């Protein structure tokens, strides 16, 4: 049956005995109900009733009443609307989208004075297409488009992964029905909604998976030791049996196997009358694999998703005593977001070639980084950053402890990576990672963890617990792969959400980490990200939350704008590589120096970077050498790196560098080095070979963090007039004035950059009226002022030499 001729558009369970049926068109009769039955036995519903148009509007965000269309949203769904000063408008195909902003005829108004209320707009019929399907969305007066949630039945993907609502005149609010199943009926998993009117018989699957994905439990999960007893508990809603094997040998040769009992219809548990701290264990989960929605195997050892420590990617889990998992007695207070300078780094990259005495084992993990951090002339202290972002340290799927891995294939969310520990068989990773975090804090550095909650590594232990509950599948029940890693976690089910949130809370409460960067956060979803923000900031209000806002499916940077998340700014990365090579434009450089204002609600939401672990490193991206191999950089490569550093640290927002970027790190043109420890390990000899570049980065960082550089650390939404730009025709060279309007009681700054091979003489009315002290150019940085070879300025102009930059403190 073609989609256009279908009678039923959607059907799903709301609860154990009720659900929603959404028809493809209005049911216009007021005296009869649609010919709907509950299959496969064609049972009559105990109750079938049409929702009111207003109630239908809660699902579709619009409905018709008499001679008008009404569009509606709930303020509690969008926290930004709880501020009654925010105005919101309807934009769509029918009114030019953003052109509707500011027009009263398209403004939604609140029904009451309460913070949590309904916003509604009445639109005359003549203003909307009568026989045409169109798309729409809601937008604030500041141009922030409110997201269309996944639960909306009329949600559709538009271009570039953006989601909109569909407006269909044939669905005016008379097309949604609620059913109640027959008295005493228990869903068994094969239910259908059947339309039969004598002419047409249509069968629409009522997926048991809709019911399954609402399953949850409030019981504690994992291995819990209390008062000399150990309780094992696992959420497995469709399992037919669950067992646990535990013992004292990590290979499982002495394990005794014990059956768990189903305790609340979805969870399984066993209480053992002894303290099993230090024991090893696996779960074994069996069930029915029909329909391809499950992947049970009763012989497969499943690593407990709640294990607080484990021994490798296959397990086993380790029972950790509660004394070792005490909450941190105090919280470290890191720098404010707008004061952060971040370095992204990898545990083994930092320690592998550290120029201090370390054992081979120490060079593989936490212990080596700790000693290198504390050593004289420590690179991490010397560079001057105040925030470290570590690539993943949650247990991942390196095949052997010595194998190098970036860590983006997580197998357990609670356990610190065991291969980085000195004695992983005794779960020393717990104490070692605690100590590492404490050492960073002692040096005044905040610690952010890169975390991966969009997919999991191999073996996929959650797959053996419940495939459909934990993973997105297509119509053939195959795993969906928008992550590019073979599986996409279904993050919005109650227990997946709980697993994510509780593991993050564990890392904050036990280890006192200061923030998280979420890999491919688009796949986690805006709803779950909002819950994460709410739950974590209740524990640590200063927590840093950063999203990689894209996936292969789409991009959510606009939706994140109204949250407390910052976003990696990939536009900055791509544009800077072009700009520094002379291929940019005036509008682009001004936009990025201003903190990318259209995609950030407050300036520190933009994490500006030109290199991360992924893709080509900076030098290999811009090098003159063939095949992107910057291992022997040219003079021009080095000069362009200095210009990039100056632009990066002079841009409003939060700057982030990659470890080694400051001494011209190259990966020899290799695009993806996720298992190339030989290429990723930092060669600290380069810090000596390119000491000038290293010192240049460090000087910029220290100036940015000083009181003299405070104009570069903007807090809040950017004020009009704070920045002023000066250009010259035919060139992307720029002068940027900071605190131009003197709105802040901090020193004014002037920054200029010219990425071209020709001089740029730029008019600037400030020059001549005020005194300027040049403190930096493309090679030097002296906060006391450069004494020789200063960039000429006078008579209302600044004369920027080719491939140059300059920074001035404005006096007067």
Image: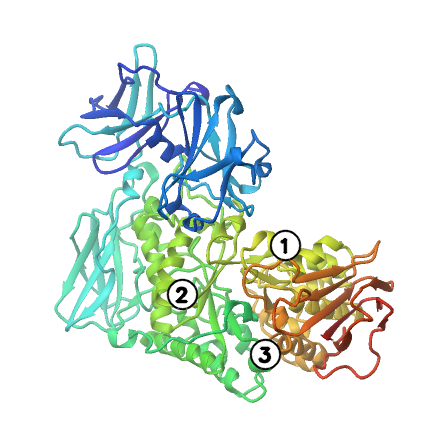
From the image, which quarter does the C terminus lie in? bottom right
Residue that label 2 marks: 395
Which of pointers 3 and 1 lies earlier in the amino acid sequence?
3
**Alpha-carbon distance for marks 2 and 1?**
31 Å
Would you call the spot at circle 1 few (<14 residues within 10 Å), some (14-19), or many (20 or more)? some
Residue that label 3 marks: 384
Which residue is at the front of the view, 619 or 773? 773
Which of pointers 2 and 1 lies earlier in the amino acid sequence?
2
Q: Which of marks 2 and 3 is in front?
A: 3
Residue drawn at x 37%, y 48% as measured from the top left: 115
Percent position of residue 579, x then y: 74, 58
Residue that label 1 marks: 571
Would you call the spot at circle 2 few (<14 residues within 10 Å), some (14-19), or many (20 or more)? many
Which residue is at the front of the view, 463 or 170? 170
Callout 3: SS: loop
- Compared across the picture, whether 726 is left or right of 143 comes to right
* Labels 2 and 3 touching (C-beta < 8 A): no
Percent position of residue 775, x then y: 74, 78
From this view, report whether residue 303 is shown above or below residue 485: below
Which residue sits furthest top? 199
Find residue 339 and name its label.
none
From this view, report whether residue 745 is shown above or below residue 7: below
**Alpha-carbon distance for marks 2 and 3?**
29 Å
Which of pointers 2 and 3 lies earlier in the amino acid sequence?
3
* Labels 2 and 1 touching (C-beta < 8 A): no
Residue 786 lies in quadrant:
bottom right
* Labels 3 and 1 touching (C-beta < 8 A): no
């Amino acid at each position: 049956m073609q989609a256009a001729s279908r009678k039923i558009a959607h059907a799903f369970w709301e609860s154990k005995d009720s659900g929603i049926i959404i028809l493809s068109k209005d049911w216009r009769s007021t005296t009869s109900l649609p010919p709907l039955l509950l299959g496969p036995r064609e049972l009559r519903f105990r109750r079938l009733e049409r929702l009111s148009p207003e109630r239908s509007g809660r699902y579709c965000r619009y409905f018709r009443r008499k001679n008008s269309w009404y569009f509606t949203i709930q303020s509690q769904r969008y926290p930004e609307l709880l501020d009654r000063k925010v105005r919101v408008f309807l934009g769509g195909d029918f009114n030019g989208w953003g052109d509707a902003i500011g027009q009263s005829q398209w403004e939604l108004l609140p029904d009451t004075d309460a913070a949590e209320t309904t916003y509604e707009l009445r639109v005359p019929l003549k203003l909307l297409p009568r026989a045409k399907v169109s798309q729409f969305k809601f937008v604030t007066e500041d141009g922030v488009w409110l997201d269309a949630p996944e639960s909306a039945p009329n949600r559709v993907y538009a271009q570039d992964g953006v989601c909109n609502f569909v407006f269909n005149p044939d669905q005016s609010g008379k097309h949604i029905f609620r059913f109640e199943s027959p008295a005493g009926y228990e869903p068994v998993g094969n239910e259908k909604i059947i339309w039969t009117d004598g002419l047409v018989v249509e069968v629409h699957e009522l997926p048991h998976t809709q019911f399954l994905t609402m399953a949850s439990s409030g019981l504690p999960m994992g291995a819990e030791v209390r008062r000399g007893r150990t309780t094992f508990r696992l959420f497995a809603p469709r399992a037919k049996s669950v067992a646990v094997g535990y013992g004292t040998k990590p290979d499982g040769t002495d394990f005794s196997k014990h059956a768990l009992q189903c305790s609340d219809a979805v969870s399984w548990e066993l209480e053992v009358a002894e303290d099993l701290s230090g024991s090893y264990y696996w779960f074994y989960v069996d069930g029915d694999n029909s329909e391809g929605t499950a992947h049970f195997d009763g012989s497969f050892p499943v690593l407990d998703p709640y294990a607080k420590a484990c021994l490798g990617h296959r397990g086993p889990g380790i029972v950790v005593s509660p004394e070792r998992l005490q909450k941190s007695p105090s919280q470290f207070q890191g720098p404010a977001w707008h004061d952060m300078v971040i370095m992204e780094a990898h545990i083994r990259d930092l320690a592998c070639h550290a120029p201090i005495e370390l054992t081979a084992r120490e060079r593989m993990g936490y212990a080596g980084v700790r000693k290198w951090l504390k050593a004289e002339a420590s690179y991490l202290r010397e560079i001057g950053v105040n925030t470290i972002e570590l690539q993943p340290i949650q247990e991942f799927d390196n095949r052997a402890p010595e194998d190098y891995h970036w860590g983006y294939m997580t197998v357990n969310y609670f356990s610190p990576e065991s291969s980085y520990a000195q004695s992983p068989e005794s779960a020393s990773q717990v104490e070692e990672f605690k100590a590492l975090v404490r050492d960073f804090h002692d040096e005044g550095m905040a610690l952010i963890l890169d975390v991966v909650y969009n997919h999991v590594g191999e073996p996929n232990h959650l797959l053996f617990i419940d495939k459909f509950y934990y993973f997105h599948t297509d119509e053939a029940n195959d795993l969906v792969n928008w992550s590019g890693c073979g599986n996409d976690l279904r993050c919005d089910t109650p227990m997946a959400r709980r697993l994510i949130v509780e593991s993050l809370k564990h890392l904050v409460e036990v280890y006192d980490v200061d923030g998280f960067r979420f890999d491919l956060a688009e796949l986690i979803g805006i709803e779950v990200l909002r819950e994460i923000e709410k739950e974590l900031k209740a524990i640590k209000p200063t927590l840093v939350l950063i999203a990689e806002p894209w996936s292969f499916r789409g991009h959510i940077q606009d939706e994140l704008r109204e949250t407390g998340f910052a976003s990696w700014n990939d536009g900055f990365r791509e544009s800077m590589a072009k700009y520094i090579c002379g291929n940019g434009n005036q509008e682009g450089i001004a936009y990025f120096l201003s903190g990318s204002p259209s995609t950030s609600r407050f300036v520190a939401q933009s994490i500006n970077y030109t290199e991360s672990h992924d893709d080509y490193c900076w030098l290999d991206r811009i090098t003159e050498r063939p095949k992107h191999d910057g291992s022997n950089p040219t003079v021009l490569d080095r000069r362009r790196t200095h210009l990039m550093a100056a632009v990066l640290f002079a841009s409003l927002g939060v700057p982030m560098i990659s470890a080694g970027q400051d001494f011209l790190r190259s990966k020899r043109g290799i695009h993806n080095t996720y298992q190339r420890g030989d290429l990723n390990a930092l060669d600290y000899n380069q810090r000596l070979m390119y000491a000038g570049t290293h010192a240049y980065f460090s000087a910029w960082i220290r100036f940015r963090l000083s009181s003299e550089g405070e104009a570069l650390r903007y807090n809040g939404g950017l004020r009009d007039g704070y920045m002023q730009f000066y250009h010259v025709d035919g060139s992307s060279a720029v002068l940027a004035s900071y605190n131009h309007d003197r709105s802040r009681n901090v020193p004014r700054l002037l920054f200029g950059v010219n990425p071209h091979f020709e001089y740029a003489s730029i008019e600037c009315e400030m020059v001549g009226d005020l005194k300027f002290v040049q403190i930096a150019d493309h090679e030097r940085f002296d906060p006391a002022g450069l004494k020789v070879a200063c960039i000429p300025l006078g008579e209302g102009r600044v004369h920027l030499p080719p491939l140059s930059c300059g920074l001035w403190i404005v006096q007067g």
